[in-house]
Image: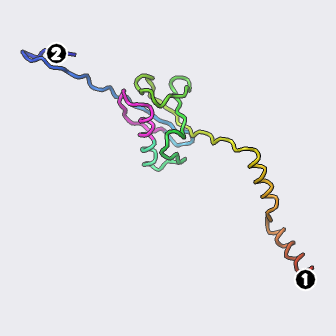
Amino acid sequence: MIKEIGNVKGVIKEPNKRLLVSVNVLGSVGPISFLANEDDRVSSVINTALKAYAREGRIPVLGFDVDNLICYSVNAGFNIMNPQEMIGSVAVTKILLCKKEPEPEEEVEVEERRKGKARAVRGWKSRLLRSLFYWKTRR
């Protein structure tokens, strides 16, 4: 926008619009609110939220990796947000963060663990019986 002031032509930049973003974390006490520029990416907004979340010492602990989180827009019917989008383009001010579920292990590994646990001695009763059996055979 060009505006003439007296005899001087000048360019007046429009100020960046700022949005009040409210981020809820699943399982946390309450939202974290902060200001973000309209042209910030969703990933940078999530990073800011994670830093504020860690600074306040909230539970559950999320870490600092954006890739381990799923970001939902609460305003738009719980749609998953793309981390590369601009926060102003989606016009979302309320965000819900959730941890991604860990990938399921292969069944073979789970079965091997179960077999290993079945061989392990459990509890005080089995140790007592084993020690009594040991003393009975020694006599």
Name the spot of residue 79 as percent of width and height, x first.
Answer: 55, 25
Which quadrant holds the C terminus?
Answer: bottom right
On residue 100, which mark appears?
none
Q: Residue at x 26, y 22 (%)?
A: 14
Crowding at dot 2, Cα within 10 Å, few <14 / some 14-19 / many 20+, comes out as few
Name the spot of residue 66 as percent of width and height, x first.
Answer: 49, 39
Task: Using the image as rendered, state which of residue 63 and residue 74 is in the foreground.
Answer: 63
Does the CB distance between marks 2 and 1 fall below 8 Å? no
Residue 84 drawn above or below residue 133? above
Q: Is residue 85 left or right of residue 121?
A: left
On residue 138, which mark appears?
1
Q: Which residue is mark 2?
A: 3
Q: Is residue 69 left or right of residue 44?
A: right
Q: Which residues are magenta?
A: 31-49
Inspect the image, locate mark 2, and give the three-letter code of the amino acid beneath it: Lys
Inspect the image, locate mark 1, and give the three-letter code of the amino acid beneath it: Arg
Q: Residue at x 34, y 28 (%)?
A: 18
Q: Quadrant of residue 132?
A: bottom right
Q: Residue at x 45, y 23 (%)?
A: 90
Crowding at dot 1, Cα within 10 Å, few <14 / some 14-19 / many 20+, comes out as few
How many numbered discs?
A: 2
Q: Earlier in the sequence, mark 2 or mark 1?
A: 2
Task: Using the image as rendered, state which of residue 119 and residue 53 is in the foreground.
Answer: 119
Name the spot of residue 43 as percent of width and height, x first.
Answer: 45, 34
